[in-house]
Image (cartoon, rainbow, N blue to C red):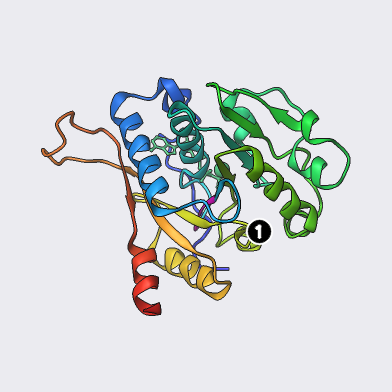
Amino acid sequence: MAKNSKKVQPKSYENNKQFIGSKLNFEGREAYNLLRTNLMFATKRNDRNARVIGITSSIHGEGKSLTIINLAYSIAESGRKVILVECDLRLPTIRKKLGLAKTTGLSNLLAGINSEKATLHKDVLIKGFDVVQAGDIPPNPSELLGSKAFTNLIDNLAESYDVVLLDLPPICEVSDSLVVSKCTDGLIIVVRNDYTNASDLEYTLRQCDLVDAKVIGFVYNSAAAKSKKYKYGYVKKYKYGYAAASKKAKSQS
Ligand SMILES: Nc1ncnc2c1ncn2[C@@H]1O[C@H](COP(=O)(O)OP(=O)(O)OP(=O)(O)O)[C@@H](O)[C@H]1O
Ligand SMILES: [Mg+2]
């Protein structure tokens, strides 16, 4: 585990519905639309029908779940079918963020206790945005996420959706994201302004490299933008870069 990975959340970062879906302000929504567009260009459908993308970060509280919800919303708004699968089986937050009923979820599905139908929330917030929440907290998350049942589930979902988004836990804290990365077409890493430290991010990228996880980009979350070049004066700016992907491509060429 990397040093300094236990951080206290900034006080102003409460679970706030105003940052989700249609409640988000114009600038925030535009930023997620840009993230969606960049994602579509940065990835293509492989032999599976869908793009399968994992969203992770170095430490907890960097904005992974908020990012994945708003990205999914933006994808559904563009007319594509998207499913968000909550793979943070240890500290799930999606149910609360989306105000979902407490149902069983991924862990129950993988343990063979419940069917896909029983765990699926359809058309959440907007048509075309489906969710599988984490479910009951299991004693063996890594084992479940590394199982054949998980790979089969993702392959099945990839048949019926355009995009499969996996909400993953932080890499400095548990190895689950690295285990799941093999089922994805790539990982997006969320980096939070004034919160993530460089050594944790370095550790994260090293771990991704070690398991050959493909980092397709970064979301720079919660940066206060003062630049005048943004006509509408962004309060919060989200950036999405290709730094890691292009660095890797260069080193391979
Ligand atoms: N850009 C932002 N502006 C305001 N609040 C934010 C922003 N990004 C995240 N938050 C808030 O910070 C908190 C942590 O965000 P979130 O739950 O998305 O992080 P996470 O990386 O998924 O955390 P965890 O690792 O615990 O799952 C939430 O209350 C969320 O609403
Ligand atoms: Mg989360």
Residue at x 42%, y 20% (from the top left corner): 23
Is residue 110 left or right of 185 when viewed as pictured?
right
Residue at horizontal 55 percent and vertical 62 percent from the top: 172
Residue 34, position as x, y percentages in the image: 33, 40
Residue 41 in the magenta stretch? The answer is: no
Label the magenta part by its dominant secondary structure.
strand
Question: Looking at the picture, how far across and down is residue 7, in whole percent?
Answer: 49, 53
Quarter of the figure that contains the C terminus: bottom left
- Above or below, 166 relative to 80: below
How many residues crowd around disc 1 within 10 Å: few (fewer than 14), some, or many (20 or more)?
Answer: many
User: Does the segment drawn in magenta span residue 57?
Assistant: yes
Q: Which residue is mark 1?
A: 176
Residue name at image x 64 percent, y 32 percent: 131
- State the SS at label 1: helix
The stretch in magenta equals: 53-58
Q: Could you say where residue 87 lies in the image, as x and y percent from the top left?
A: 66, 47
* Viewer-side residue, 82 vs 132: 82
Left or right: 231, with 159 as reference point: left
Badge 1 amino acid: Asp
Measuring 34% from the left and 66% from the top, which residue is drawn there? 246
Q: Residue furthest left?
A: 228
